[in-house]
Image (cartoon, coloured by chain):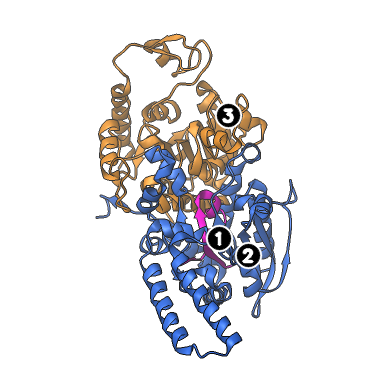
Chain colours: A orange, B blue
Amino acid sequence: MSWLTQAAKGIKALTSQKKDIPDNLWRKCPNCSEVLYHRELDRNLWVCGSCGHHLPFTTEQFIALLIDEGTWEETHTGITSVDALDFKDSKRYKDRIKASRQKTGKEDAVICGRGAIGRVPVSMSIMDFSFMGGSMGSVVGEKISRALLDSLRYREAAVILSRSGGARMQESLLSLMQMAKTSSVLARLRSEGIPFISILTHPTTGGVTASYSMLGDINVAEPGALIGFAGPRVIKQTIGGDLPEGFQSSEFLLEKGQVDIIAERRELKATLERALNWFVEGRDVSIRRPPRG
Amino acid sequence: MDWKKKALWLDFELPLVELEERIQTLQDSADVRGMDVQEEVARLRAKAEKLGREIFEKLEPWQRVQLARHPRRPTTVDLIGYIFTDFQELHGDRMFRDDPAIVGGMATLGERKIMLIGHQKGRDTKSNIKRNFGMAHPEGYRKALRLMEMAARFERPVVTFIDTPGAYPGLGAEERGQAEAIARNLREMAALPVPIVVVVTGEGGSGGALALGVGDRIYMLENSIYSVISPEGCAAILWRDGAKSKEAAKAMKLTSADARRLGVIDGVIKEPIGGAHRDHEGMAASIQGQIQDALAELEQLPVNDLLDRRLQKFLDMGDFEDAGRS
């Protein structure tokens, strides 16, 4: 696909986000209960003007926010989940996949693509919480691995934006192995000197946190995101008591040394640009070379 | 351990245990009174063997879960005693503390010097508290990584034993970066320039298991389990009822045969009839043979090939439909 058709595709993606905006014109801030109007929210990048709480942003909104206009090319489409375990709880996994695809219009819980951030080429994956809680099964693991392999192939920086409840239980052992799979490719990026930036947004837990999300050369979190290995409910059960205020928040993780930066949404692109420039300027990693072999 | 304690046997294996006790009693009394009971003993032995096969050849997934967690099942320390010589345990992550939920150290296997690392459960309340039921904190995974990196520096292969319900979900664990500790092990094991052989010996629970589980060869003991979350955890989340663990165990396809079918493991190591806990020594001998065979093969590979194959092994894991490739 040429860069021209990509640009056209990028525009299409921008209009399709309208679908995600509900019909009611205002929303209550889940943090401070302030009534927020959609137009104002859009202007504010879905950050509460009163308390600064970051409301969920769609994948398309993140692409529009972070990727240089007209440079986004979606990659690795057409990869979809199968029910390898013939898994059934109250519903069949097959039916859950179907329902999620219908509800979200997405193929699975991640969108991958290539584009530029501040003119630095990147291969980027954006997880989508609305698709089965952003859970990582074989498809998410495969697409993220392929996107990371693109980074190796084209020697361009890798960026992953996470929001996920963790590994997808309906694929059990196969989901678990996606942690090893994605981390194995990251080991190659590391030895090849290709930078990886992990962006953690609300919420990022479980097997996703315990694999690529925590493995960034730098880890950047949105303010107030819940980030952890075990979910708060499980920890409460284990310790038989309440959790301290702010436990597992982005700010807590910064204090404990687990993330490098907390970036507000309006600062996120500038933060990425600054880091990417530091990583690639004057190094061959930024040069798009033909694939090896 | 008191081998007579009934509480330490599972319901479904009790008939076999009781029959074996009868045989033992008969022999003992015969010895005392000088009676000839050979025929009767032989008859009962045949019966016991048949019964054992009947019980153990068609186990439900939940029964395998119970066997994998059997209070008599050989732990890492038990197996080390049979499989390796000259084991020297090494302690601590050099940053925070020594985590007794993971043991590791220098060991000799035949002619080879290797690094052995495994989860360690206790067998009774006291030892389980010490070992935190085999649930490691970040410092446990960091100790493991320290030992693996040392092994690589001295060109010693790594052998890991997996037996954990999962990584510990507590305050301190989160504060000290449980997720990062696991993630880092996955990445570093993927790039470790020496052969790694993984054996799931009991419970392979979640990321806490996988943090010792990235290797060139992965084996499971016949009655061990391997899954993304414990059956109880899965039941609590998907069924919203922790008591539905049996159903969850079935749905999750967590047995060694399932893992083989899903292409995640390289082989299943047969257990003695009645399970690994009935014959620790016999079990250890099978594991030892498998590790030696695997290492003999892996040592033939140049390091780059070894690492390329390790990456490809994990890239191949997963099942999906790909419109672009069909």
Residue found at x 32% / y 43%: A89
Which portion, as a residue range, is magenta? B195-221
**Image location of residue A171, percent across then percent down:** 37, 49
**Image location of residue B317, percent across then percent down:** 40, 57
**Image location of residue A151, percent across then percent down:** 46, 47
How many other residues sit within 10 Å of disc 3, few (<14), some (14-19) or many (≥20)? many
Mark seen at residue B147: none
Q: CA distance from mark 1 to mark 3?
A: 45 Å
Q: Is residue B53 above or below residue B144?
A: below
Q: Nearer the viewer, mark 2 or mark 3?
A: 2
**Amino acid found under the numbered disc labelled 3:** Ser
Q: Is residue B221 above or below residue A152?
A: below
Marked residue chain, label 3: A
Q: CA distance from mark 2 to mark 3?
A: 50 Å
Residue assigned mark 2: B2
Residue found at x 50% / y 27%: A269
Number of numbered tags placed on the structure image:
3
Looking at the image, tell me whether mark 1 or mark 2 is earlier in sequence order: 2
Q: Secondary structure at mark 3?
A: helix
Q: Is residue B236 left or right of residue A219?
A: left
